[in-house]
Amino acid sequence: MPACTTNPHALAGVIARLNAPDYDQWAAQIRATGGCRQPIHLRGKVEHYDRATGQLLHRYTTRKRT
């Protein structure tokens, strides 16, 4: 079995992340992406209109509402 080595720089990064004030938000994002290290961030919107009336039926956007 290979010896376990610890990279001091990586360990310091882990400790800093765990103590960061935005840790809960960061952890939620990691869970939402399934733990992916480099998720693809898509942006845009989708709008569905009734062809006969032109009425907007549904709208979805990736824009955050604050």
Image (tube, rainbow, N blue to C red):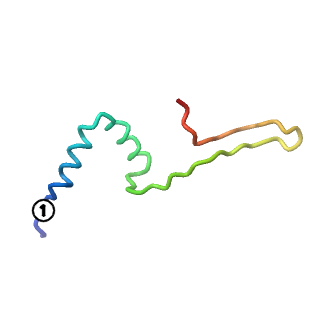
User: Can you say which quadrant of the picture contains the N terminus?
Assistant: bottom left
Number of labels in the image equals 1
Q: Nearer the viewer, residue 44 or 52?
A: 44
Q: Residue furthest bottom?
A: 1
Determine the residue positioned at 23% across, 43% down: 16
Residue count near mark 1 (Cα–Cα under 10 Å), binned few <14, some 14–19, many ≥20: few
Q: Is residue 12 left or right of residue 20?
A: left
Q: Residue furthest top?
A: 66
Q: Quadrant of residue 6?
A: bottom left
Q: Position of residue 56 (x, y in %)?
A: 77, 37
Q: Nearer the viewer, residue 63 or 24?
A: 63
Determine the residue positioned at 69% across, 39% down: 59
Q: Residue furthest right?
A: 52
Determine the residue positioned at 10% across, 66% down: 3
Q: Residue furthest front?
A: 9
Q: Nearer the viewer, residue 12 or 27?
A: 12
Q: Is residue 25 left or right of residue 63?
A: left
Q: Position of residue 48 (x, y in %)?
A: 75, 43
Q: Nearer the viewer, residue 19 or 3?
A: 19
The three-letter code of the residue at mark 1 reads Thr
- Find disc 1 in the rendering and name its residue: 5
Q: Secondary structure at mark 1?
A: loop
Q: Position of residue 10 (x, y in %)?
A: 21, 54
Q: Position of residue 20 (x, y in %)?
A: 27, 37
Q: Is residue 42 left or right of residue 36?
A: right
